[in-house]
């Protein structure tokens, strides 16, 4: 069980291995403790028995969040583990997981338990979409694919992942996921406005799903990663 306490007493991270087209790397589940002691599980990962039991010691899971239309594979298992939790999804997840039960769709409103602590912004590409979430009390921005950050210091990646990232000019250079860059945006002006809204939020760290965390100069790193869309 590889659990990392990112913000003492409030945010925990669990990296786990994934494989895509022969490329091996890690994804990251995030757990946020709300002011009332309940938990938000952001982008759930596989829940081994030890992870499930550990989460029970943290508090009651109130909300399960599928924040991107490519980040939903472990949601049903998380629902089985925590049947009393609400499930909120990014628009588009319902088309990729037609049997998935959910309580609400992010982008318009937030679950009641999250409204006082979070901001949200929906960013929609032609292929990939996600809802960015800002946890205001810790000034932590939660993203999944709007930034990927692979480089020489990234653990647990194989040669195929390195080759792909170098091909896309993303090795040692944070950038939008290739699916955003290749397929583009449904509405570029709307996407640009959403990214600018995110950059206007008050945050100083970024938790991402794939690659190294952004813990310094966060806004500068994001602006560089998004520069082709922001111009």
Image (cartoon, rainbow, N blue to C red):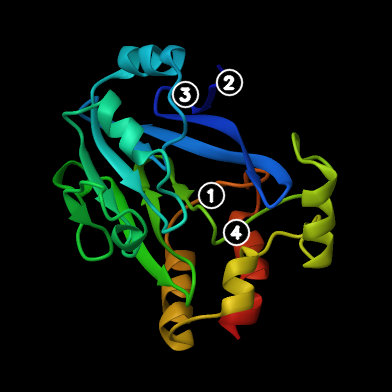
In primary-sequence order, the first of circles 4 and 1 is: 4
Return the residue at label 4: 147
Separation of marks 3 and 1 at Cα, in angstroms: 16 Å
In primary-sequence order, the first of circles 3 and 1 is: 3
Q: Horizontal placement of 55 versus 203: left or right?
A: left
In primary-sequence order, the first of circles 4 and 3 is: 3
Pick whichever, 187 or 79, lies toward us: 79
The disc at residue 8 is 3
The image shows residue 222, relative to residue 16, as above or below, that is below
Return the residue at label 2: 2
Foreground disc of the pair 4, 1: 4
Q: Residue 192 location in percent, x, y?
A: 48, 80
Separation of marks 1 and 2 at Cα, in angstroms: 24 Å
Separation of marks 4 and 1 at Cα, in angstroms: 15 Å
Foreground disc of the pair 2, 3: 2
Secondary element under disc 4, as helix, strand or loop, is loop
The image shows residue 201, relative to residue 30, as above or below, that is below
Q: Horizontal placement of 47 versus 17: left or right?
A: left
């Amino acid at each position: 069980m590889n659990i990392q306490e990112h913000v003492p007493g409030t945010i925990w991270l669990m990296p786990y291995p994934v494989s895509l087209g022969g490329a091996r790397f890690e994804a990251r589940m995030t757990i946020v403790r709300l002011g009332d002691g309940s938990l938000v599980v952001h982008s759930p990962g596989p829940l081994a028995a030890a992870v499930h039991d550990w989460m029970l010691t943290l508090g009651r899971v109130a909300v399960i969040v599928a924040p991107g239309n490519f980040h939903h594979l472990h949601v049903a298992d998380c629902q089985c583990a925590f049947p009393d939790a609400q499930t909120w999804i990014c628009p588009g997840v319902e088309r990729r997981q037609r049997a998935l039960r959910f309580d609400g769709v992010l982008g318009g409103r937030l679950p009641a338990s999250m409204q006082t602590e979070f901001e949200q912004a929906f960013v929609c590409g032609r292929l990939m979409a996600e809802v960015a979430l800002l946890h205001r009390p810790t000034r932590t921005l939660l993203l999944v694919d709007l930034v990927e950050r692979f480089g020489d210091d990234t653990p647990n990646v194989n040669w195929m992942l390195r080759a792909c990232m170098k091909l896309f000019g993303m090795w040692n250079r944070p950038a939008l996921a290739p699916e955003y860059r290749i397929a583009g945006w449904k509405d570029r002006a709307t996407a640009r406005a959403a990214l600018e809204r995110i950059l206007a939020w008050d945050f100083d760290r970024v938790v991402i799903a794939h690659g190294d965390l952004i813990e310094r100069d966060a806004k500068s790193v994001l602006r560089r990663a998004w520069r082709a869309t922001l111009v």
